[in-house]
Image (cartoon, rainbow, N blue to C red):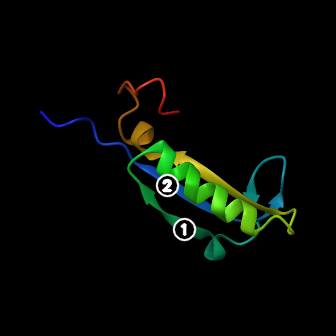
Amino acid sequence: MPDKQLLHLVIGGELSDLENNIFKDLTRVDIVGAFPSYEAAKAAWRSKAQATVDNALVRYFIIHAHKLLDPDAEEAADEC
């Protein structure tokens, strides 16, 4: 049986509410991509976050989509 497939999404954009992570305009959310490992997702997240350091309202997030798809699944301790 193959190893469990992991799915990490990296998205971001300008927020209107920093405390509650509410996007200013959902039609302008930047979908960076889907990544098979946390390390790859973190590298993409870091790159986008550093590129937007001058705009305090822009935030990027890593979504552990595999946990949303299968909440009972165990994940390796070093993944999250």
> Which residue is depicted at the point 40% across and 28% down?
75
* Residue hosting label 1: 31
Q: What residue type is labelled 2?
A: Leu
For disc 2, the marked residue is 9
Specify few, some or many for label 2: CA neighbours under 10 Å numbering under 14, 14-19, or 20 or more: many
Q: Which of 41 and 22 is in front in this view?
A: 41
Say which label, 1 or 2, has the lower sequence index: 2
Label 1 sits on a secondary structure element that is: strand
Q: With 25 as the anchor, is 32 left or right in this view?
A: left
The image shows a total of numbered marks equal to 2
Residue at the image point whose x is 64% and y is 62% from the top: 47
Give the number of the disc on residue 15. Answer: none
Name which residue type carries label 1. Ile
Mark 1: few/some/many CA within 10 Å (<14, 14-19, 20+): few
Q: Where is residue 39 in the image (x, y as percent from the top left)?
A: 50, 45
Location of residue 76 in the rendering, given as x and y in whole percent from the top left corner: 41, 26
- At a point 71% along the width and 60% down the height, the residue shown is 49
- Against 40, is 31 above or below? below
Residue at the location (37% across, 42% down)?
69
The answer for how far apart the CA atoms under marks 1 and 2 are is: 8 Å
- Looking at this rendering, what residue extends furthest in the left direction? 1
Quadrant holding the N terminus:
top left
Residue 11: image location, x then y, percent: 59, 61
For residue 59, above or below residue 65:
below
The one of 32 and 72 positioned closer to us in this rendering: 32
Q: Which of 71 and 61 is in front in this view?
A: 61
Q: In this view, does 67 lie above or below 44?
A: above
User: Along the horizontal axis of the image, is 65 left or right of 4?
Assistant: right
Residue 74 in percent (x, y) is at: 37, 24
Element under disc 2: strand
Would you say the residues marked 1 and 2 are in contact, meaning their CB atoms lie under 8 Å apart? yes
